[in-house]
Image (tube, rainbow, N blue to C red):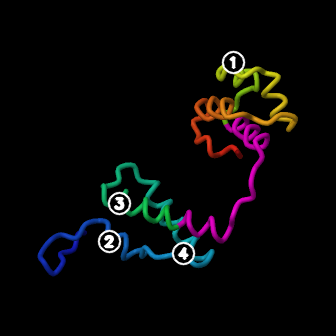
Amino acid sequence: MATVNRLGNVEDRYFQLVRRYPLRPIRSDQELNEAVQMVDSLLDRRDLAPEEEDYLEVLGDLIERYESEAHPMAPVSDAEMLRHLIEAKGVLQTVVSKATGITDSTISEALSGKRALNRGHIGKLARYFGVSPDVFAF
C-alpha cells in the first residue's frame, strides 16, 4: 500500500525499500548478509519498477564496495581464468579454439601456464565468453 507524504504525493517504491533496508555503507558481514537478502528478494521478482531497479543498483554498489574492501579476492592467473571460463561455459578447448581462431596449441600452452596470452588472444576470448578483457591479468 502506497503512503502519502506531507506534500500530498504518493511516495514511490524507492523510499519504501529504503525504509526496509536503508542505503548506507555496509560495515559488517551481518549487514552484508542482510543486504544480500534484500537483493535476493528483489531479484526473485520479475517486473521491478524503475525506482526498485535504482535501489537495487545502489545496494549492489554498496555490497560490491564492502566485499572488495573486507574480502578482497586474490589475483587469478590467465590460466586459471581461462580454465574457469571454459568449465563454466561447458565447452571443450577445441570448441574455444575454433570459435576464437586461437590455435589449440596456444590455448593448451596458456592453460598449462607455459604461454602468456597476448592482447589479441584476450580480446578474442573476452568476446567469445562475453566478459570484460579486465578479467585477465595484464
Dot 1 alpha-carbon crowd within 10 angstroms: few under 14, some 14 to 19, many 20 or more: few
Dot 3 alpha-carbon crowd within 10 angstroms: few under 14, some 14 to 19, many 20 or more: some
Which is closer to the viewer, label 3 or label 1? 1
- Magenta residues span 63-88
Q: Earlier in the sequence, mark 1 or mark 4?
A: 4
In the visual, does 118 lie left or right of 110? left
- In terms of secondary structure, where does tag 3 sit? helix
- In terms of secondary structure, where does tag 4 sit? loop
Residue at position x 49%, y 63% in the image: 61
Q: Earlier in the sequence, mark 2 or mark 4?
A: 2
Q: Which residue is mark 2?
A: 16
For marks 3 and 1, give the CA distance. Answer: 42 Å
Q: Which residue is mark 3?
A: 52
- Amino acid type at mark 1: Lys
Q: Is residue 99 above or below residue 77?
A: above
Residue at position x 32%, y 71% in the image: 16
For marks 4 and 3, give the CA distance. Answer: 19 Å
For residue 98, which numbered disc appears in the image? Answer: 1
Instruction: Residue 37 in the image: state x and y as whole percent.
Output: 52, 66
Viewer-proximal residue, 101 or 33? 101
For residue 26, which numbered disc appears in the image? Answer: 4
